[in-house]
Image (spheres, rainbow, N blue to C red):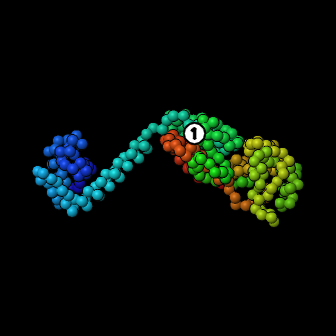
């Protein structure tokens, strides 16, 4: 027969409390019940753990060895039970998520039905903003940010990365021709961002490096606006794969100068307050969306 967790607990309590009677009071048992448990444990182990007299109690050499191991086992069991209890909790409450509108539309919204089916008691609020927001001011639990992060008091969790593509509509290319070099690209109608200017640094390899600084003929603050302009045949733009993959696959957009693109990928992070304990509803969403973004085609 093997020792049980109750027997380990009784033994550890006796040692820590200093006597059988004190341990019995701590455990809510009678001294005779604790004494019988100790005797049964020693019988199972075929060794004496405690030398007991009417006046004193002392650990044997085997008892000292067994005490350290038994205490560690009990601590591990307690930690395991706590983690299991956390997994069995039912995530609930309001979860406010903020992201740039293109990412929300193309990378988050398609998975929301599945998330709600898994966690029906989480009340989602999906907000979009194409600029970096203050989480406290906007009462936001979690924000998803695309691109390099600046130093921040927020905690950041990587969710994946997205390749960038130069794209244009078949109609635009039929009218203006497909650029066959970086030099001819500059003669085309280019669509870019109003801000930040770093988004108009396209990851295109050329004689001077792996980034091409462009001066757009038409600018917009939102990547989704640029996507719609490209679909409407207004020019060539540089957008993330999570926005353009389906358009490219279905022929609504065409990749431009694909052989000249560098291997740069935009990092994707979730950010939340560093000094707060991560709520279960936030943890559930992070695990859920990370699994789907990690497996997505870049």
- Residue situated in front as seen by the camera: 57 or 175: 57
- Residue situated in front as seen by the camera: 188 or 198: 198
- Residue situated in front as seen by the camera: 96 or 18: 18
Where residue 121 appears, as percent x and y from the top left, is: 50, 34
Q: From the image, which quarter does the N terminus lie in?
A: bottom left
Under tag 1, what secondary structure? loop
Q: Is 282 left or right of 79, judged from the image as shown?
A: right
Where residue 153 appears, as percent x and y from the top left, is: 59, 47
Extreme residue in the front direction? 55
> From this viewpoint, is residue 227 visible?
no
Q: Mark 1 points at which residue?
A: 141
Where residue 26 appears, as percent x and y from the top left, is: 24, 42
Q: Is 271 left or right of 236, judged from the image as shown?
A: left
Q: Is 226 left or right of 133, judged from the image as shown?
A: right
Quarter location, residue 30: top left
Residue at 61% from the left image edge and 40% from the top image edge = 135
Residue at 53% from the left image edge and 47% from the top image edge = 287
Residue at 80% from the left image edge and 56% from the top image edge = 213
Dot 1 alpha-carbon crowd within 10 angstroms: few under 14, some 14 to 19, many 20 or more: many
Quarter location, residue 179: bottom right
């Amino acid at each position: 027969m093997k020792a049980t967790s109750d027997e380990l607990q009784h033994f550890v309590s006796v040692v820590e409390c200093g006597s059988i009677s004190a341990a019995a009071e701590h455990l809510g048992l009678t001294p005779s019940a604790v004494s019988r448990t100790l005797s049964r444990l020693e019988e199972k182990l075929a060794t004496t753990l405690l030398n007991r007299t009417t006046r004193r109690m002392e650990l044997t050499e085997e008892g000292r060895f067994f005490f350290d191991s038994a205490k560690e086992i009990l601590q591990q069991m307690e930690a395991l039970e706590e983690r299991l209890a956390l997994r069995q909790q039912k995530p609930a409450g309001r979860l406010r998520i903020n992201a740039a509108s293109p990412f929300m539309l193309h990378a988050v919204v398609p998975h929301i039905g599945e998330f709600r089916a898994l966690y029906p008691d989480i009340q989602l609020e999906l907000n979009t903003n194409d600029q970096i927001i203050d989480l406290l001011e906007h009462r936001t639990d979690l924000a998803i940010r695309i691109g390099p992060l600046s130093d921040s008091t927020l905690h950041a969790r990587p969710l994946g990365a997205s390749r960038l593509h130069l794209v244009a509509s078949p109609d635009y290319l039929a009218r203006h021709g497909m650029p066959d070099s970086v030099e001819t690209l500059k003669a085309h109608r280019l669509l870019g961002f109003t801000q930040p200017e770093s988004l108009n640094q396209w990851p295109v390899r050329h004689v001077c490096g792996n980034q091409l600084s462009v001066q757009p003929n038409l600018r917009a603050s939102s990547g989704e606006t640029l996507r719609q302009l490209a679909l409407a045949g207004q020019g060539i733009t540089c957008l993330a794969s999570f926005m353009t993959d389906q358009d490219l696959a279905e022929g609504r957009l065409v990749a431009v100068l694909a052989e000249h693109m560098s291997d740069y990928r935009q990092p994707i992070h979730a950010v939340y307050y560093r000094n707060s304990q991560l709520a279960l509803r936030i943890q559930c969403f992070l695990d859920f969306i990370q699994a789907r973004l990690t497996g997505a085609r870049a």
